[in-house]
Amino acid sequence: MGKSNNNPRAYGRQSCTKQFWKAGEYEGAPRNTRRQMDSSSTSGFDHARMHPKFLHSNATSHKWALGAFAELLDNALDEVHSGATYVNVDVLDNKKDGSKMLLVEDNGGGMDPEKMRKCMSLGYSEKSKMADTIGQYGNGFKTSTMRLGADVIVFSRSDRTQSIGLLSYTFLRSTAKEDIVVPILDYERRRGNETWGKMFRSSSENWDKSLETILEWSPFESERDLDHQFYMMKQHGTRIIIYNLWEDDEGNLELDLDTEAHDIQMRGVNRDEKNIQMAEQYPNSRHFLTYRHSLRSYAAILYLRLPTNFRIILRGKDVEHHNILNDLMWSEQITYRPKPIEKEETYIAKKTKKEKKDTNMVAEVTLGFVKDAKNHLDVQGFNVYHRNRLITPFWRVWNAAGSDGRGVIGVIEADYINPAHDKQGFEHTLLLDRLKQKLVETQKAYWSTNCHKIGYAPRRNVRAINEEREAAKSGSQRPVLDSNPDKSSSRKTPVLDSNPDESPSSKRPVLVSNRDESSSRKRPVLDSNLDKSSSRKRSLPDSNTNEAKSPPHKSQKVSSDKSPNGNADMHKKNTVQTTTKSSTRRQEIVLGLSVVEQPRKENQGNVAADVQTERCKSRRENEELILADEKARGDNEENNLKEELRNASNTIRELRIQLQKANEEIKKLNMQQDERARRNKEENNLLKEELRDKSNELEKANEEIKKLNMQQDDLIDMLAESEMKLRHST
């Protein structure tokens, strides 16, 4: 007969995919065997009643793998209050299969057995009650480790205890578990010595079973290897090892561990080779261009403030903390106080409510142009921090159609808004919408006011900016009288002109069209320098005027002649006037009509000529004003150049005086040096002479000594001879 199905391994280990986004396809064991497995395979283990598939679905909250590293760094930073001084992130080799593993360790206070079990469970967090910690949901360890790899083993040592916990998705899937089973080993320090003994929570059999499971599904082969991990952390701390790292669709590790020896990087869409090259060219924008794929770049800006005695070590090299504010120029700071959201309150609550101002409902917004903004890079966004932790890196709140907003970087710490569970964004609330609206308004106002400083066309206050530029060039601010452009200009501006020669009562503004053949838009010129003749009234002349101006009739001319025959002539005159009266009247009427038509035509021609004359005159005067303004501008520039030349000549004169003084000082120093050298030379000569004299005396003394020695030798010889003589005589 075949083997009994009571053994869970009789069903065979289910294959585990290496791709994170496919690892959630797990249905568990067949239904008819679940009860048998629940009673036989999970007894004695510490476990949470939850399906193993939840580990994967819970980890999908991290869309970005580097965000999972941030959760582990947060846990290490929270241990600062327990004495932690560093967190070390490194890459290890799995001795069983040669694969790569991730290491995250700190030297904090460690975890006792109770804290270890809460760490392996979901939703347990004591940090939410502490003001100086980042974690608050009790979910970060599980989501982050399961996002980076399928399995994790934790070693933690406190003052009196040490524990080992294994959270293995591979183990749960391969053995078709229906619950999240967590094998945990506990040790306690024996009193009076430094040895560690086993710590049983239920029975020794369960402890041995947990040890067997950990050794089978972990990268370590013996209990001695497990003890060596505690030896690596010295007195206390936590050591997290993540293995069976996730792979991409091509079978490569999702994390790039080979390109940079001191960094952990991402593959795929988060990596942009163009941005990497630009980061080398524009160092002030490096973190914006590389934080998506580089853990070192992301960790450098992850915290707004880092404790002075705390280090982040990445693969053997410290991560240099970087404040984005150091990359800004022309920065501005704005205090934002959001309006609190009104909540429904009971009558008693309203009566007993005390008027207290929430000091946390305030945020300091600092923004400015990144120092590389003059290169017109598409770099913009706000780094929004919560409790010192970066939640949304370079949040792009303003998506303008053109180049508006480029180069503006900001930093804000919004502690009054709750972050999402993955700490890669905020909960979408009304407070977040108001903050976004405020940031958009702030960025627009800053951009439109300062964009001309980095080479963009001014967006507002164009006239003020131009006057500011002119004032900066000329040294004095003056109004522009006229801006009559050349014929190639497409826009004509109105020019206010007046003739100072005429009295104010005679000035009448006339709107004249400046006709320019090459201009597409005509510039209206407001001019009051019109001749008095242009104000003639177009009226018909009366009959008296016409008669006065009309040429005299022949009968009238004849009647005005004098004759010697007075009476006869007068009679003839009256007769002629009487007989021609009716015909003359008829002719006068016809003549009057012709005379009326003639002045009307003359008046029309005069008016057109006057208008044309006035146009030419106003144009000439405008040109004269333009020339005068250009002349004045040229005079001002000439005066400024003269002033600058005068200042330069004064500066040169002062420099020459200083140079003369310096030369005199140098001469004095040279003379002093020469004098000192002469004295030294004299002293050296004296010393040489003294030395020569001493040497001569020494030679004389040596000669005397030689003579004395010779005399001594002679005396010795004489004594010897005398002794010989005495001996012979005796």
Image: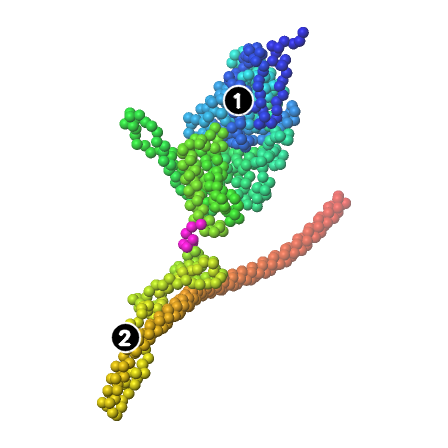
User: In the image, what residue occupies the spot 41% across and 52% down?
Assistant: 461
Which residue corresponds to mark 1? 54
Q: Residues within 10 Å of mark 2 (few under 14, many from 20)?
A: few
Which residue corresponds to mark 2? 544
Closest to the observer, 58 or 98: 58
Image-based side of 489 in relation to 171, left or right: left
Closest to the observer, 701 or 406: 406
Query: Would residue 239 be visible to someone looking at this image?
Result: no
| Residue type (three-letter) at the residue carrying disc 1 | Phe
What x and y, as percent, mark residue 576? 27, 84
* Above or below: residue 321 compared with residue 99: below
| Residue type (three-letter) at the residue carrying disc 2 | Asn
User: In the image, what residue occupies the spot 53% across and 22% down?
Assistant: 54
Tell me which corner region of the image, top left, top right, bottom left or bottom right, holds residue 432. Answer: top left
Element class at badge 2? helix
User: In the image, what residue occupies the spot 37% across and 62% down?
Assistant: 511
The region drawn magenta spans: 459-465
